[in-house]
Image: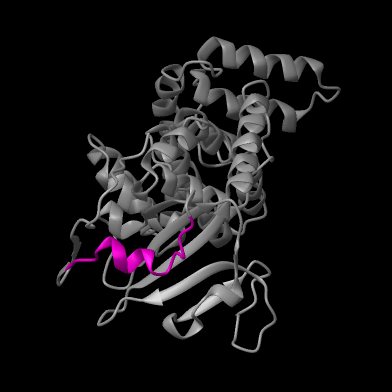
Amino acid sequence: MSDMIETSIMPTISLPGGALELDTAFLLQSCYVQPDDIVVVAGTLIEGIGNAYSDIDVYVFTNSYRSSKTIDLERHHRVISVERDIIRPETDACNVLLIHTVVPGTSIKVDVEFKTFAEVDSVFDRLREIYRYATRNLILLTKRLTDREEVMIHRLFNCIVLRGADAFQRLMGRISKQEYLYVAYRWVASDFAILLDLAGAWDSGDVDRAVELARENVFIQTSGYLRLRGVTSLRRKWLLTYLRRLPDTAPLLARFLDLAYLRDTDNDAGKRAFIARSLDFVDYLFELSSPLLAAMPGVPSGESGLRLLERDRANSEFTNEYAAWEYEYRTKAYGQRGAPTRHRFKGLASF
């Protein structure tokens, strides 16, 4: 469950140059609260990783949207409709999605977003459906929520409740953090498509593009590992921050930074060695992921995962190098180490 409190005074938000204190009244002024509403505040500043230019994200969970005619437009930096139009004084009455208000004397903006209870219920229902599918199918998981919905879920798990704590507890009883983490992991786990792009670039002699794709693969699979470690934020721009916050990751972090910063890639030999290192690093991530999957009750891992992958391979009409390599690559996260992935790349086995 999220870290949540219902309070009349916001905690002090630490900034690099000092601190910011916001009381609940200031935030609620932009929420146009109705009796049954739940109001929570979230974002990187609340998590302790923001800066002087970060936003404060407020969600108002409500029965119905506010009409633009009930909003004092002059008090806010910007008001946006559910159709994503900027609402101006002459705009016809419409439903309000977002209200942006700048904190006086700062560069910090308070973003208030309205979501109906029916919309949140729909998100939770779809997530549960995706989870059920994911636990029965290990090859592909292309069913997704929208980016905005995924961001909302992360913030729900990392927020402070300003209003309606009991109702918020009931709302969060409808979503499982573990199920979300598993689904989020599966969205990126063992991404075979990017490995094929990397193999194609390598085979054609386009070493620079192969380096680019190798680095991208490192970021994608590191994000998958973070999700197994409990990180619900899926935004790439915060990947390094969350990786640094995890305990016992110093060796992993050192290898990640070596690859993220493209070290020693100023000549052809260095680029080829970089690609080999990146593939070895991803294999290492799969090795680390296997026990984390095994610790998740109710999801395929180890032998049960291998059986599902074998089932799909046996039922496939296609038996070719593509299918064999995909099966081999995907089994690594389920404890079947096999040959290093770089051995599939001509000329990289010796690096």
Q: Quadrant of residue 132?
A: top right
Q: Residue furthest front?
A: 35
271, 72: nearer the viewer: 72
Residue visible at 65% across and 41% down in the picture: 122
Considering only vertical position in the picture, is 339 above or below 6?
above
Chief SS of the magenta region: loop
Task: Give the x, y percent position of residue 153.
Answer: 49, 45
Considering only vertical position in the picture, is 121 above or below 295?
below
Q: Residue furthest bottom?
A: 90
Task: Give the x, y percent position of residue 99.
Answer: 49, 71
Q: How many marks?
A: 0
Quadrant in which the N terminus is drawn? top left
Q: Residue furthest right?
A: 317
> Is 3 placed left or right of 329 in the picture?
left
- The magenta segment: 20-34
Considering only vertical position in the picture, is 54 above or below 299?
below
Residue visible at 46% across and 33% down in the picture: 170
- In the rendered image, residue 24 lying in the magenta stretch gets the answer yes
15, 169: nearer the viewer: 169
> Is 68 placed left or right of 173 in the picture?
right
